[in-house]
Image (spheres, grey):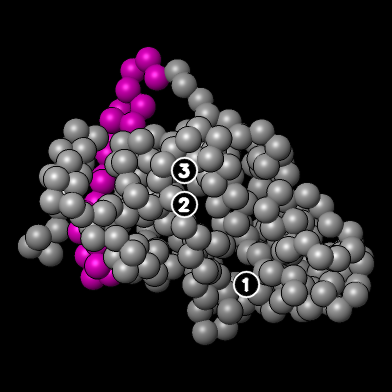
Amino acid sequence: MTDFLTFRTVDEMRTQVATWRADGLTIGLVPTMGGLHSGHQKLVTRAAKKCDRVIATIFVNPTQFGAGEDLDSYPRTEKADCEIIADAGGNAAFVPNVSEMYPDGFATTVKVSGLTDMLCGATRPGHFDGVTQVVSKLLNQAGADMAFFGEKDWQQLAVIRRMARDLDIPTKIMGVPTVRDDFGLALSSRNGYLDAAQIEVARQFNVILRKTAYDIASGGLATDECAKAGQAILDAGFERIDYVECRDAHYLELIDRVEDQECRIFAAAYLGRARLIDNHSVS
């Protein structure tokens, strides 16, 4: 990691980005909250294939956590995270503190209406306002050509794309397919909260959603199949369900019967301390 750079301030990052741009290099950005795993590694690897230089950000953003959520316990593993970024082909990490991102007197919010009113937006009020606030800042701070986000957080990806379009942010927003373990469980930093028995339960989540997507595509009514999936998730050992819904892939409108539109099955459920989310294409 001898050539790997770590920026603590916006000015440090912008100075280096200006140098790279003067050399005609393209810049990729991978926003993360740290606690990196193979899914994040794939984001960095994809960015390195598309861009000449890659910056990954590590910032546990307090404005996207609600009361009683896991802000204080969220994994903070900077040294290991930087090693993962470097091994995946990244060139730098931007690791600001809270005061660098939100200095005294900070008073600006960024809200995307509509797309944030359902799914995780309904069960985690204010969450996406925090996401759009911090991501808009990161995109402006880095001035990257492309920014890379995982499709596991499909709603987040849709919200960020709408925000970038509406605010004329020139960075191209790139989605990267979900990385899963050998049993299909979507990788997440919060999977670290699960013990071995809970991991076995969690691996049923993907199985149930894939079956539900198939049943909907085969002609079943989405609302009926989603209700069955919800019961199956509870029967598998999950403690509580936030939602199981079939929605349009782009506008996130509820779908009852699949016709020609592209749609997906979305779900969120609790298992121990972990809130797991996932989604699958209905086709």
Q: Which residue is mark 1?
A: 202
Mark 1 or mark 2: name the one nearer the start of the chain. Answer: 2
Position of residue 119 measured from the top left corner of the image (x, y, whole percent): 71, 49
Q: Which mark is residue 173?
A: 2
Mark 2 or mark 3: name the one nearer the start of the chain. Answer: 3
Figure quadrant of residue 128: top right
Residue 85 is inside the magenta segment: yes
Compared across the picture, whether 237 is left or right of 107 comes to right
Judge whether 11 appears above or below 267 on screen: above
Label 3 close to label 1 by CB (< 8 Å): no
Q: CA distance from mark 1 to mark 2?
A: 30 Å
Give the magenta-colored segment's residue range: 81-106
Mark 3 or mark 1: name the one nearer the start of the chain. Answer: 3
Q: Which residue is mark 3?
A: 71
Residue 116 is inside the magenta segment: no
Position of residue 207 measured from the top left corner of the image (x, y, whole percent): 69, 79
Position of residue 94 measured from the top left corner of the image (x, y, whole percent): 26, 46
Q: Residue at x 13, y 51 (%)?
A: 23
Q: Which mark is residue 111?
A: none
Quadrant placement of the N terminus: bottom left
Q: Residue at x 89, y 63 (%)?
A: 257
Q: CA distance from mark 3 to mark 1?
A: 22 Å
Count of marks, rendered view:
3
Crowdedness of circle 2 by 10 Å Cα count: few (<14), some, many (20+)?
A: many
Q: Quick check: can you spot residue 183?
A: yes
Q: Secondary structure at mark 2?
A: strand
